[in-house]
């Protein structure tokens, strides 16, 4: 079944990366709905390595803001929520639960290169799924890098094997603060069918 054109617009064609936000809160319940939708999207061996910290409180924002480059501070300060997308490099310990039909944990034990690659790739995918889920549920998103990963890791993931990947500001975007839409590559410039 194909989505209708309006739904495709919401998810892709008219969706924008927001840098300015309306002063409208995002409920904890809506954040749970976003997670409960995005968790169904695929990862390799159902590894699901993303670990997400939804930064909402003023106290948590004060911990996050010093780690950002200057250009990301104000848009993050004013965003109702900033999701820190982390990647758990101990994700394979949950594979007996998540991929129970075989001993997938043994594929990773002692293979740090495979652990790191799998954690990074699949947590990145899950962050993208979170953007789509947020848009599907009426939120706008502003994904970004431009922060000190080590500082974010120390502030929010100390004592774990979780490393920050990227950030996503979430809320209700202020359309008046959007930049003109940038062009995209054509199919011929970016793809081929063999």
Image (cartoon, grey):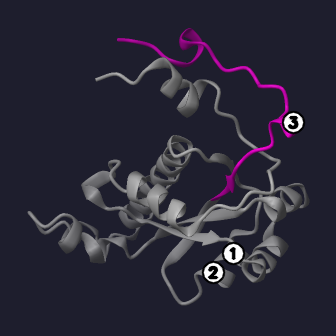
Q: What residue sits right under mark 3 in the picture?
A: 176
Question: Pointer 1: what residue?
Answer: 152
For mark 3, give the secondary structure: helix
* Residue 21 at x, y percent in the picture: 80, 51
> CA gap, disc 2 to disc 3?
33 Å
Region of the chain picked out in magenta, as a range: 167-194
Give above or below for 97 relative to 130. Answer: below
Q: Which of marks 2 and 3 is in front?
A: 3
Q: Residue at x 64, y 77 (%)?
A: 153
Front one among 44 and 129:
129
Picture quarter with the C terminus: top left
Q: Where is residue 16 in the image (x, y as percent from the top left)?
A: 69, 35
Does dot 1 land on a helix, a strand or a loop? helix
Residue labelled with disc 2: 156
User: Front-most of 51 and 9?
Assistant: 9
Residue 183 vertical placement versus 54 (above, below): above
Q: Gap in Å between the C-alphas at discs 1 and 3? A: 30 Å
Q: Does the magenta stretch include residue 33?
A: no
Q: Mark 2: which secondary structure?
A: helix
Q: In this view, does 162 lie to the left or right of 56?
A: left
Whether the residues at callouts 1 and 3 have beta carbons within 8 Å, the answer is no
Please state the horizontal and vertical placement of residue 10, each as a whole percent of the image.
Answer: 57, 31
């Amino acid at each position: 079944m194909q989505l209708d054109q309006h739904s495709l617009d919401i998810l892709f064609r008219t969706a924008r990366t927001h840098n300015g936000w309306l002063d409208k809160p995002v409920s904890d319940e809506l954040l749970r709905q976003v997670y409960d939708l995005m968790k169904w999207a695929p990862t390799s061996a159902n590894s699901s390595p993303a670990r997400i910290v939804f930064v909402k409180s003023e106290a948590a924002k004060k911990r996050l803001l010093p780690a950002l480059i200057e250009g990301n501070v104000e848009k993050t300060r004013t965003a109702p929520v900033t999701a820190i997308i982390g990647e758990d490099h101990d994700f394979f310990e949950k594979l007996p639960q998540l991929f129970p039909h075989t001993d997938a944990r043994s594929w990773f034990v002692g293979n740090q290169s495979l652990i790191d690659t799998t954690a990074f790739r699949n947590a990145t995918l899950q962050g993208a799924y979170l953007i789509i889920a947020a848009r599907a549920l009426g939120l706008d998103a502003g994904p970004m890098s431009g922060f000190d990963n080590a500082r974010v890791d120390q502030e929010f993931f100390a004592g774990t094997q979780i490393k920050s990947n990227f950030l996503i500001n979430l809320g209700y975007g202020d359309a008046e603060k959007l930049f003109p839409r940038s062009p995209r590559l054509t199919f011929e410039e970016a793809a081929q069918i063999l």
